Structure formats: C-alpha cells, structure tokens
Image (cartoon, rainbow, N blue to C red):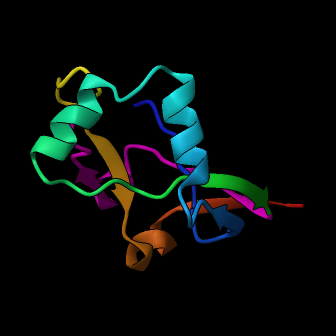
Amino acid sequence: MKTSAIKSDNHKIILDDNRSFQKWHTKLKGGLSNYEKDRIARNATSCYRKTSAELQQILLLVINKNNQTYLDIHKQGRNSDGSTRNVKYMLNIEQAHHFEVGKINF
C-alpha cells in the first residue's frame, strides 16, 4: 500500500484571493488547458491557489494489516487528461486512535 498524506489544517497558508497568481500562471503556460476548458464547460468551480505555506508539524501514521480497515476510500476525481484518478485512502479523525502516531514539529 503506497501512502502519503498532508494534514492540511496544520500549516499557515496564503491564498491567491484576487487570482493574480492564477492569471499569471495561465499566461505563462500559454492559455487555458483542455482540462480548464472542460471544467468551464461543466460549470465547475476553480479552486483558489495557495501562494505559500509554512509547515508547522508532520504527523506520521503507522498503517498495517491490523488497522488499515479503519481507513476510508477517497475517490479524487479526474486527471487533466480526463482519466479517472487512482483512489486514495482517507483517515476519519475519529478512528485515529487505532494508529501509532509519530510527530515532527518545526
């Protein structure tokens, strides 16, 4: 089982509120991608970009055959080419006590 995770509520972020970074990036790459054009055609919203983040803590969870049943499956949508992304595992915080946790603080 390949695993990686980001506890996204435990870092400071700065969002691109006026979308200036998004506009710059779109111009840099030569315009809208086919994925973005398809998203617009579907009336799907565009997420704000993070322009910086300050990592404060990393939590390491030991996942093994005894506790992997406490993970949920997260279907994450589509890739830029339209193909389905591989499913990922998600931890319900209510089930965290089933896992050994290591911490690295910054």
Q: Compared with residue 12, is residue 52 higher up or lower down, i.e. above or below?
A: above
Residue numbers of the magenta segment = 56-78
Query: Toward the viewer: 23 or 84?
Result: 23
In this rendering, the answer to whether 95 lies above or below 25 is: below
Describe residue 38's horizontal placement relative to residue 58 as left or right. left
Quick one: quadrant of the C terminus?
bottom right
Where is the N terminus found, in terms of image quarters?
Answer: top left
Indicate left or right for 44 with 65 as reference: left
Q: Write the residue at 53% across / 56% down.
A: 19
Give the residue at x 17% y 29%.
84
How far across and how far down the image is residue 59, in percent?
A: 67, 59
Asked if residue 87 lies in the magenta stretch, the reply is no
Is residue 86 at all visible to an observer of this figure? no
In the image, residue 40 above or below residue 36? below
Residue positioned 22% across, 34% down in the render: 37
Taking the spot 77% from the left edge, 63% from the top edge, the residue there is 57
Q: Is residue 52 left or right of residue 37?
A: right
Between residue 49 and residue 22, name the one nearer to us: 22
Q: Nearer the viewer, residue 56 or 39?
A: 39
